[in-house]
Each structure stands twice: as structure tokens, then as C-alpha cells.
């Protein structure tokens, strides 16, 4: 059977209403809270400043003291160096002066020694002359007392060792140390020696040592 269903009319579509976009809500900027600056009390600031000034003053004073100590030490070193140089110069001058003085003393000593030697030489020569003179006087006096007839006609020679006292007296018997070979002549000379006391001596007592022990040579017949 035919389709008799009546189709209902389709209603027209509803119009699409386009919504306008809503404006975004206005956001008010949020102010940041201002930082609160803590104010330090003025009294604390002044104290801190004073404290720093005192500390700096102490540092400055310490530096000044250290600098002063350094200057004093440097001055002391310089003074010490000057003193050493001065002492060295004085020591050198003294050494030179002492050396010169030593040389002068040595020169004077040499001159004095030479002078003394010359004086001694002259005195020794003079003394030798005096000694020789008195030895001849002693021989002459003894020879004058010798009985020459006992010595014969020849030229006999004999030697005696004679000891004398400062008075010119004999300190002992004469000692024959070399005979003439003629006993009678030897005895004649010995008797003449003892008969000649006191024998002549020089007035200078310092020369007596040369006469304490005399060794005299006699030649009765030739006068010596």
C-alpha cells in the first residue's frame, strides 16, 4: 500500500547569533610596597665614626713610632759606622806613630850603641895604654932590684905569675912559669919581685882586675 505518511515540514534553522568578544577586564597595576629604610640612630653613627677615628689614630701613631724607631736605628748604625771609621783611622794613625817612634828609638839606640862602642873602644884603648904603662913600671921597678950578675952574659928569658893586692902588695909568693934555665937567675928575679913591694898600680880602681894576676916576662940583661 502506498506510503501515506505525511511528512512534517522541517522548521527553518535558527539564526546563529555571533557573540561579540567581551573586552578583557582592566587590571590595575599593583604598586609594590616601598622599602622601609631603617634609619640608624644618629648617636650610634657618631660613636662608630669616633671609634674608627680612634682606631685609625692608633694605627697612625703606631706607624709613626715604627718609623721613628727605624730612623733612630738607622742613625745609630750610621753613628756606629762613623765611630768605627774614626777608630780605624785613629788606630792606623797610632800604629804609624808607634812605628815611627819605634824606628826613632831603634835609630837612637843604634846611635847610642855605636857611640857607646866608640866610647868603650876609646876607653879600652886608653885603659890598654894605662895597663901597658903600669906593667912596664912594675917590670922596671923589679928589674932595678935584680942582681944581673947572676944571669950571666946571655939573654935569658923567664916568666913569673904574680898576684897583687889593691895596695900593690903581693897576695902570695911569685910563681915561676918559665925558667931561664939558670936557677941562680930565676932566684935573683924572684927575690927582686919580693923586694919591690909595693908595686905601682894605676889610681883607677876599675883597672885593678888587670893586675890581680899578672903574667910578666923578664929579660934581665936587655932591660925588658
Image: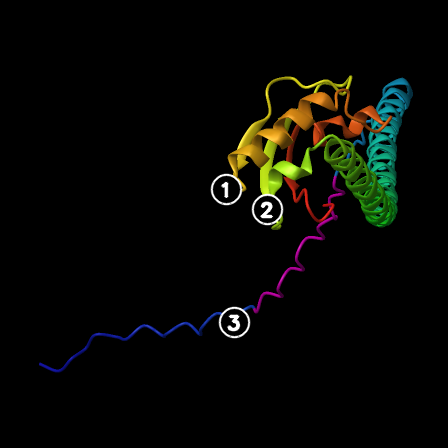
Q: Quadrant of the N terminus?
A: bottom left
Residue 221 spot, x, y in % from top left: 68, 46
Tell me the residue at 58%/41% (across/down): 158
Name the one closer to the observer, 203 or 85: 203
Structural distance between the alpha carbons of marks 3 and 1: 209 Å
Name the one closer to the observer, 140 or 154: 154
Label 3 sits on a secondary structure element that is loop
Q: Quadrant of the C terminus?
A: top right
Q: Earlier in the sequence, mark 3 or mark 2?
A: 3
Name the one closer to the observer, 54 or 64: 64
Residue 161 spot, x, y in % from top left: 59, 31
Structural distance between the alpha carbons of marks 2 and 1: 8 Å
Say whether residue 164 is left or right of residue 90.
left
Say whether residue 167 is left or right of residue 146.
right
Tell me the residue at 61%/36% (across/down): 150
> Crowdedness of circle 1 by 10 Å Cα count: few (<14), some, many (20+)?
few
Q: Identify the mark at residue 15; answer none if there is no mark.
A: 3
Residue 148 spot, x, y in % from top left: 68, 38
Label 1 sits on a secondary structure element that is loop
> Crowdedness of circle 2 by 10 Å Cα count: few (<14), some, many (20+)?
some
Label 2 sits on a secondary structure element that is loop
Tell me the residue at 36%/74% (across/down): 9
Q: Identify the mark at residue 181; answer none if there is no mark.
A: 1
Residue 176 spot, x, y in % from top left: 54, 32
Task: Confirm or deny contact between disc 3 and disc 1 (CB under 8 A).
Answer: no
Decide whether residue 31 is among the magenta residues: yes
Q: Which residue is mark 2?
A: 156
| Residues in magenta, as a range | 18-32
Q: Earlier in the sequence, mark 3 or mark 1?
A: 3
Amino acid at each position: 500500500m502506498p506510503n501515506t505518511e505525511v511528512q512534517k515540514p522541517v522548521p527553518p534553522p535558527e539564526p546563529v547569533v555571533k557573540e561579540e568578544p567581551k573586552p578583557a577586564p582592566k587590571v590595575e597595576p599593583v604598586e609594590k610596597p616601598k622599602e622601609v629604610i631603617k634609619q640608624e640612630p644618629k648617636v650610634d653613627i657618631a660613636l662608630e665614626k669616633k671609634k674608627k677615628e680612634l682606631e685609625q689614630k692608633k694605627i697612625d701613631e703606631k706607624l709613626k713610632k715604627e718609623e721613628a724607631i727605624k730612623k733612630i736605628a738607622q742613625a745609630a748604625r750610621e753613628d756606629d759606622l762613623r765611630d768605627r771609621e774614626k777608630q780605624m783611622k785613629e788606630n792606623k794613625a797610632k800604629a804609624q806613630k808607634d812605628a815611627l817612634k819605634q824606628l826613632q828609638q831603634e835609630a837612637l839606640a843604634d846611635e847610642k850603641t855605636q857611640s857607646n862602642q866608640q866610647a868603650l873602644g876609646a876607653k879600652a884603648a886608653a885603659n890598654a895604654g894605662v895597663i901597658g904603662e903600669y906593667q912596664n913600671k912594675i917590670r922596671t921597678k923589679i928589674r932595678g932590684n935584680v942582681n944581673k950578675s947572676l944571669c950571666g952574659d946571655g939573654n935569658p928569658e923567664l916568666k913569673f905569675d904574680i898576684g897583687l893586692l889593691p895596695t900593690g902588695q903581693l897576695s902570695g909568693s911569685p910563681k915561676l912559669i918559665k925558667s931561664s934555665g939558670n936557677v941562680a937567675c930565676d932566684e935573683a928575679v924572684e927575690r927582686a919581685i919580693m923586694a919591690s913591694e909595693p908595686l905601682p898600680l894605676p889610681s883607677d880602681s876599675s883597672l885593678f882586675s888587670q893586675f890581680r894576676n899578672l903574667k910578666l916576662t923578664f929579660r934581665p940583661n936587655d932591660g925588658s
